[in-house]
Amino acid sequence: MPRPRRMPVAGILFDKDGTLFDFQATWAGVVEMLLDDLAPAPADRAAMASDAGYDAAARRFLPGSPIVAGATAETAAIWARHRPDLGARVIEEMANAAALAVARRPGGLVTAAPDLPGLLDGLAARGLALGVATHDTEEGARVQLGAAGALDRFAFIAGYDSGHALKPAPAMLLAFARQAGIAPECVIMVGDSRHDLEMVPAAGAAFAVGVLTGPATAEDLAPHADHILPSIAALPALLDSLA
């Protein structure tokens, strides 16, 4: 059952990949670009894909993939076991460069709502502050949001390299609330993984909204979400129902 809200909702903090952008459609291209460079041999490519929780044949990420919930540095450390000649830091830099390259090429990004800027404008018109908390780099988030025409809609953008503890620690949500000048109890967290949703009780936030535009299923998210939506496109209707 949804937790009763103690204060009116004043802000929404979004995860990025799997929430604002369709995870499978966007990050499959990034991983495949990286595997082309890191693992040209078929056996090495299969092993590295498996370790990253990526089904190369289906071009889909599996629930529990470190790429889904973890920071780029964590996946780089896993892959460095296969490429000790490069090391985790170099692989991390390659991964961040690949993400930027995909974001900048036509068709590289697939938003989770048909009109992402319009959706965000509608939320802002309700008087809501908007923010992003991602385990991508802050630069990567800004490039992607800029490519989608949505960068200027957000008052707060934090990546894994922005100086806050990683999700599910509450630091990103609390920093968003401070910057927006609102109480954490007034913030909704919207995300596609349990790490996103577990920020809510940790921060004392209003409630957690799970979306199904990432690899996780409704059953995966149900224990951690107050509400589950097919995508962020359904968020205005949810807000109307709670008003």
Image: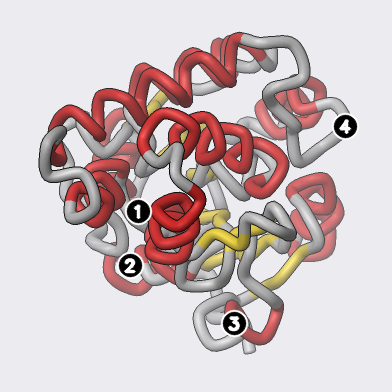
Q: Is residue 40 left or right of residue 204?
A: right
Residue type pointed to by label 3: Asp
Mark 3 vs 2: CB contact within 8 A: no
Q: Quadrant of residue 164?
A: top left
Mark 2 vs 4: CB contact within 8 A: no
| Marks 1/4: CA–CA distance | 29 Å
Mark 1 vs 4: CB contact within 8 A: no
Mark 2 vs 1: CB contact within 8 A: yes
Look at the picture and state if 115 lies above or below 84: above
| Marks 2/4: CA–CA distance | 32 Å
Quadrant assignment for the C terminus? bottom right
Q: Which residue is mark 1?
A: 184
Q: Quadrant of residue 76?
A: top left
Residue type pointed to by label 2: Gly
Give x and y (percent) for residue 110: 75, 31
Q: Residue at x 62, y 42 (%)?
A: 28
Q: Residue at x 83, y 53 (%)?
A: 234
Marks 1 and 4, the one that precedes in the sequence = 4
Pick the front one: 243 or 136: 136
Q: Which residue is mark 3?
A: 220
Q: Residues within 10 Å of mark 1 (few under 14, many from 20)?
A: many
Mark 4 vs 3: CB contact within 8 A: no
Marks 4 and 3, the one that precedes in the sequence = 4
Secondary structure category for the residue under label 4: loop
Indicate which label's residue lies in the foreground, 1 or 4: 4
Is residue 124 visible in the rendered structure shown here? Answer: yes
Q: Residue at x 36, y 17 (%)?
A: 139
| Marks 2/1: CA–CA distance | 6 Å
Secondary structure category for the residue under label 2: loop
Give x and y (percent) for residue 157: 39, 27
Q: Which residue is mark 4?
A: 114
Marks 2 and 1, the one that precedes in the sequence = 1
